[in-house]
Image (cartoon, rainbow, N blue to C red):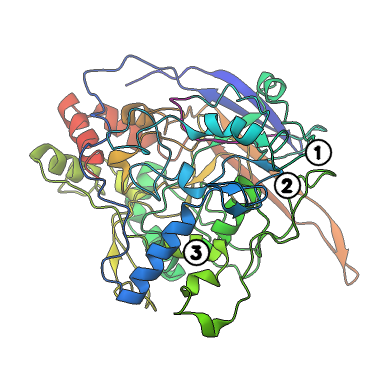
């Protein structure tokens, strides 16, 4: 077993409800070790292999757009993308999604893959690119993960939760006259008011997008007795427009890959687009382009085939979405005796097994609906996620509410490709899988209490809707306890299995 230390690092109030956050004590690690990111081929980063020639060519064209580097003007050599800023976290999708191959997650110098996956955090160099005068925040380091920063509360004490761009275009050679300052990160850090997110991998996401709601709902309902015994429930985030399940992002806040790409284009690069047409931080002197900066390219379609492809007509965000949608799933290498034992231990508990139940949330199989893309319909894939929200407790709570996802709720992170991932948890706080398992647990003495109530009249009739969330600890506590109750060799088997994914 291991000890928890009730050391609060922040607390905040939502309509009278106090939410505390604690850190786990590091504890004494035993002999088990994370073997580290798997060397060798990436096993990811290509188109779905069953696609036809036209679909495959479209993916490769979209891949080029995904790598495009953005500047304010789009006229700087090597930076042809138009619309960077006024605030931004990066200047290319490929800058952040590169480990172990383009479309993955954050790079680092200790990656076993070749550059650029093996390289320093690109958020350091981009801070002063083209004359920009930004100061690199303390939480962005050469060896650390690519991050975005969110504030828990706004200046008057209301919930914030939004992304605050790390950098501004002030000082850039193509942003003359812009005097927009960076957020005061040192002050916000001193107030324990900053939380972080790292990039999520984009491999296999077309299969996730094309999984029917009913399939996800049935999957969540499976193994009800085992889940109840482990204290696992879960629920889905949903669209406020049509009530369907949303499934992309750390809190499953985005419905589709097109919405996901539009938000990232706008929030991470500052590019206004047809999904998010309004410029962020559009202060006087810092807006240089007509909007939306990224849009459908209106050209004569009769010239297609003579001067280019259909990708030339599509907006960048359409290409970003197509790249993710047609990305192949990661390929695991599970084969050794230890990895196979770990796979069996990871599975759903039964009367005939000693499995600890990781797969109760990290589901091993889902099947897609019919698809317009060759070979992607009726396909069974292994994301190791149920794409549902689960309470993770005070250890991981970030205070951010997105849709119905509350302060301590997160979407089950898909584990495919985790064998070559460098940073773990939503904020990249560890590079060690054993520590990541520990971090899934939270003290049952620390509760997340959120109460909402309001009253109003509609058509002369009074309404007083209210809701209360009261959850103590983490839904993963029992499974984590089972893991650490295993013999050291069995714990190592699970770690080896995870690094084979």
**Residue 128 seen in this snapshot:** yes
Looking at the image, tell me whether mark 1 or mark 2 is earlier in sequence order: 1
- In the image: residue 415, left or right of residue 130: left
Q: Which residue is mark 3?
A: 319
Which residue is at the front of the view, 314 or 408? 314
Query: In front: mark 1 or mark 3?
Result: 1
Q: Are marks 1 and 2 in contact (CB under 8 Å)?
A: no
Numbered label tally:
3
Residue density around tag 1, few if under 14, some if 14–19, many if 20 or more, within 10 Å = some
User: Mark number for residue 177?
Assistant: 1
Q: Label 1 to label 3, Cα distance in Å?
A: 32 Å
The numbered mark at residue 452 is 2
Of circles 3 and 2, the one toward us is: 3
- Taking the spot 68% from the left edge, 25% from the top edge, the residue there is 185
Alpha-carbon distance for marks 3 and 2?
40 Å
Where are the magenta residues, as a range?
Answer: 142-152
Q: Are marks 3 and 2 in contact (CB under 8 Å)?
A: no
Q: CA distance from mark 1 to mark 2?
A: 44 Å
| Image x and y of residue 13, in percent | 72, 33
Q: Position of residue 356 (x, y in %)?
A: 26, 40
């Amino acid at each position: 077993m291991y000890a928890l230390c009730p050391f609060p690092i922040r607390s905040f109030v939502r309509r009278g409800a106090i939410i505390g956050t604690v850190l786990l004590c590091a504890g004494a690690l035993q002999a088990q070790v994370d073997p580290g990111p798997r060397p060798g081929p990436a096993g990811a980063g290509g188109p779905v292999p069953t696609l036809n020639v036209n679909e495959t060519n479209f993916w490769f064209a979209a891949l080029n757009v995904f790598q495009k580097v953005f500047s304010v003007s789009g006229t700087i050599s090597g930076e042809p993308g138009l619309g960077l800023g006024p605030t931004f976290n990066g200047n290319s999708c490929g800058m952040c999604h590169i480990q172990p191959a383009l479309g993955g997650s954050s790079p680092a110098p200790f990656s076993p893959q070749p550059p650029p996956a093996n390289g320093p955090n690109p958020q350091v160099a981009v801070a002063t690119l083209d004359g920009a005068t930004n100061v690199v925040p303390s939480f962005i380091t050469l060896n650390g993960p690519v991050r975005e920063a969110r504030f828990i509360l706004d200046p008057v004490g209301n919930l914030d939760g939004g992304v605050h761009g790390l950098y501004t275009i002030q000082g850039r050679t193509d942003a003359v006259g812009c005097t927009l300052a960076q957020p005061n990160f040192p002050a916000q850090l001193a107030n324990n008011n900053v939380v972080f997110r790292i990039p999520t991998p984009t491999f296999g996401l077309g299969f996730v997008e094309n999984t029917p709601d009913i399939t996800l709902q049935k999957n969540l309902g499976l193994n009800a007795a085992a889940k109840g015994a482990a204290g696992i429930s879960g629920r889905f985030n949903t669209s406020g427009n049509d009530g369907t399940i949303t499934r992309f992002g750390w809190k499953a806040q985005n419905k589709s890959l097109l919405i996901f790409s539009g938000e990232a284009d706008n929030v991470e690069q500052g590019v206004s687009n047809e999904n998010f047409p309004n410029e962020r931080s559009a202060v006087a002197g810092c807006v240089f382009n007509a909007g939306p900066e990224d849009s459908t390219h209106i050209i004569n379609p009769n010239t297609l085939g003579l001067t280019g492809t259909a990708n030339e007509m599509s907006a960048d965000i359409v290409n970003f979405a197509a790249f993710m949608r047609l990305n192949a799933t990661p390929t695991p290498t599970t084969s050794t005796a230890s990895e196979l034992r770990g796979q069996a231990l990871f599975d759903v508990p039964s009367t005939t097994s000693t499995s600890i139940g990781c797969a109760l949330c990290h589901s091993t199989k889902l099947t897609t609906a019919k698809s317009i893309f060759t070979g992607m319909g009726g396909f069974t894939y292994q994301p190791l996620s149920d794409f549902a929200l689960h309470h993770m407790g005070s250890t991981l709570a970030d205070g951010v509410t997105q849709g119905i996802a509350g302060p301590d709720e997160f979407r089950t992170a898909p584990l495919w490709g985790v064998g070559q991932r460098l940073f773990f948890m939503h904020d990249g706080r560890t590079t060690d899988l054993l520590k990541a398992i520990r971090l899934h647990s939270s003290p049952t003495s620390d509760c997340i209490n959120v109460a909402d109530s309001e009253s109003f009249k509609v058509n002369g009739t009074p309404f007083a809707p209210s809701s209360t969330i009261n959850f103590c600890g983490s839904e993963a506590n029992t499974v984590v306890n089972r893991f650490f109750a295993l013999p050291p060799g069995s714990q190592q088997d699970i770690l080896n299995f995870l690094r084979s994914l």
